[in-house]
Image: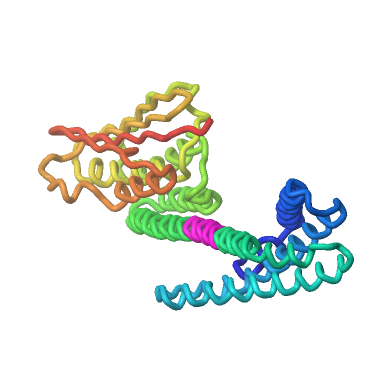
Amino acid sequence: MDNSRHPFLVSRSSIILYASTWILLAGVHVMLLLWRGDFPLYVTINEALISTFFLALLGLALWYPVRFMDTGTNNLLFILAGYGMSGAVMLLLWLTITHFFLRNFFPGIQDYPVYLNESLRWKVVGGALVYLIIILVYYLTMTWHRLREKDRQEARLEALVKESELKMLRSQINPHFLFNSLNSISALTLTDPGKARNMVVRLSEFFRYSLDHKLDDESTLEEELHHIENYLAMEQVRFGDRLVFTREIPGRCMKMKLPNLILQPLFENAVKHGVYQSTEQVEIKLTVRCDENRLRLKLSNHYDPNVPAAGRRGIGLSNIAQRLELKYGREGLMGIERDERIFIVTLLIPQSS
């Protein structure tokens, strides 16, 4: 709700609620006058209706000075003076209008003018109490809607930040792989044009998959593995028998979900820092375990321990950790282990029910 709109007039339900509250107060007014037993029933009912009707109208009008006073000022004197003046004006208008009508409605009722004069004190007290309650309700309403709007803005901002970060991560991952692939194709055009053409076809298929699958959506493990096999087939052209891929995957895990393109930078890292830097055969092994709540993927590869550790962790692995944290709102979904010869990356992918 826009704070410029009246909270009691913004919808049919709010109008009904406001009217029902005043009808209840009118009923209480009638009961108090009947308890006194000074006047006939029709006098009692008319006084209660006239008094509450005009007080309800003035209560609606109070929204506008409340909005005017809500300027963000911290000047306590200004606030107290403003509300004191608006309260005094409201009480004066209410008492003047209601007494004018009531004196003219019941001119023949003895002692009624005396009662009106004597009732001024408790009407002032009651009217002031109602005034304070209305002001409090307006302030609580404005605060509640302000907090709701703040939550909505924060949610929109978080979504924009997440989208921006995912786009940034994607722009970092794809050019990195493209650079490696074009280097391979460039080298093969001289030594083996047939293999170069094959790599161009596979590269186009690879990027078609990348463009058709949004980074913040999900695919099945089976779809991602098909994409990875395409990638490894291209790298096999570069490295031949030096690259060996094995996998251990239960069939029930193949339909489980994981973020699009989450595996490609893992394999790219394994090839770059394992196969590329070794003159020996390097095994890249994918082990998968799953249950109804999560998918666990472990990718291991041999590496050269003589290469500095700082050179073994590329931007792809950092991006994976950030992507998982952004998508699932949790840290610790990616783990890295290494011993003297084997580098292991483990991913835990939560599964929605």
Is residue 189 visible to the viewer in this orientation of the structure? no
Q: Main secondary structure of the magenta part?
A: helix
- Magenta-drawn segment: 139-155
Q: Position of residue 222 (x, y in %)?
A: 50, 33
Q: Height in image: 59 above or below 254? A: below
Q: Is residue 65 magenta?
A: no
**Is residue 83 or residue 162 the one in the foreground?**
83
Residue 324: quarter of image = top left
Residue 51: quarter of image = bottom right
Residue visible at 19% across and 40% down in the picture: 279
Quarter containing the N terminus: bottom right
Residue visible at 29% across and 45% down in the picture: 269
Q: Is residue 147 magenta?
A: yes
**Is residue 285 or residue 8 the one in the foreground?**
8
Q: Position of residue 258 (x, y in %)?
A: 46, 38
Residue 169 vs residue 94: left or right?
left
